[in-house]
Each structure stands twice: as C-alpha cells, then as structure tokens.
Image: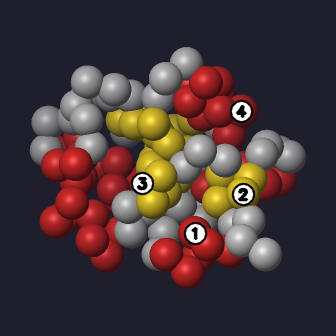
Amino acid sequence: MQEVSPTEAQRRVENGALLIDVREANEYQEVHAQGAQLMPFSEFEARYTELPKDKELVMICRSGARSGRAAQFLLDQGYSQVVNLSGGTLAWQEQGLPTEENV
C-alpha cells in the first residue's frame, strides 16, 4: 500500500481524489482536514461500497493506523486507486494545511 505525505495528499485531492476520514464522528467534529468525507472505521466494512472505484481515494485518520487498515481493506476488495495519508490528521495539521473545526 502506498503512503503519501500530507502535502502530496492535498495535491491529489486538488486534482480530484477523494479524502476519506475513517475516524469516529466525535473525532471528525473536533477537527478534520478540509474537504474530508467521514466514513467511520466502525461502519467501514458495511459502507465501503459507497466509495467510487473510478476515483483515487486518499484515506486519513488521526495518525495513519486506522486509515492504513481501511486502505488495505479496499485494496483487498479490488479497489486499485487507494493511498494512505502518512501521519494522519496530526501530520496534516503540523504541515499547516487547511482544516475545518466545529467550535
């Protein structure tokens, strides 16, 4: 499975990739990468078919572990354009990339 940096992930999203956040709803509401779509890991196996196979998917979580498992699961299900964001939301924030927060 390919790992990408936060800046590379943002570049891919700007070019049409979908950013999929697999954290739980309460984590997502606190702060998430701008444009990230929520699909909690606890629901992931039941809902993954909602994700398109014809677009690149960039998976993100807090630190990269859950999103790595989700990315591998998608690859195992026949998805081919899937990468994991190395370091997750924490790394995204450290790079100063845009986030959305519910204050």
Percent from the top left, x then y, of residue 83?
43, 37
Residue 97 location, quadrant: top right
Which tag, 4 or 1, sits closer to the chain's start? Answer: 4
Percent from the top left, x then y, of residue 40?
39, 68
Would you say residue 87 is visible in this rendering?
no
The amino acid at mark 1 is Tyr
Which tag, 1 or 2, sits closer to the chain's start? Answer: 1
Q: Report, in whole angstroms, how far the alpha carbon at label 1 lies from the one at label 2.
A: 9 Å
- Who is closer to the viewer here, 7 or 48? 48
Q: Report, in whole angstroms, how far the alpha carbon at label 2 lies from the one at label 3.
A: 22 Å
Q: According to the image, label 2 marks what residue?
A: 100
* Marker disc for residue 68: 3
The residue tagged with tag 2: helix, strand or loop?
A: strand
The amino acid at mark 3 is Gly
The residue tagged with tag 3: helix, strand or loop?
A: helix
Q: Report, in whole angstroms, how far the alpha carbon at label 4 lies from the one at label 1.
A: 20 Å
* Viewer-side label of 2, 3: 2
Q: According to the image, label 1 marks what residue?
A: 28
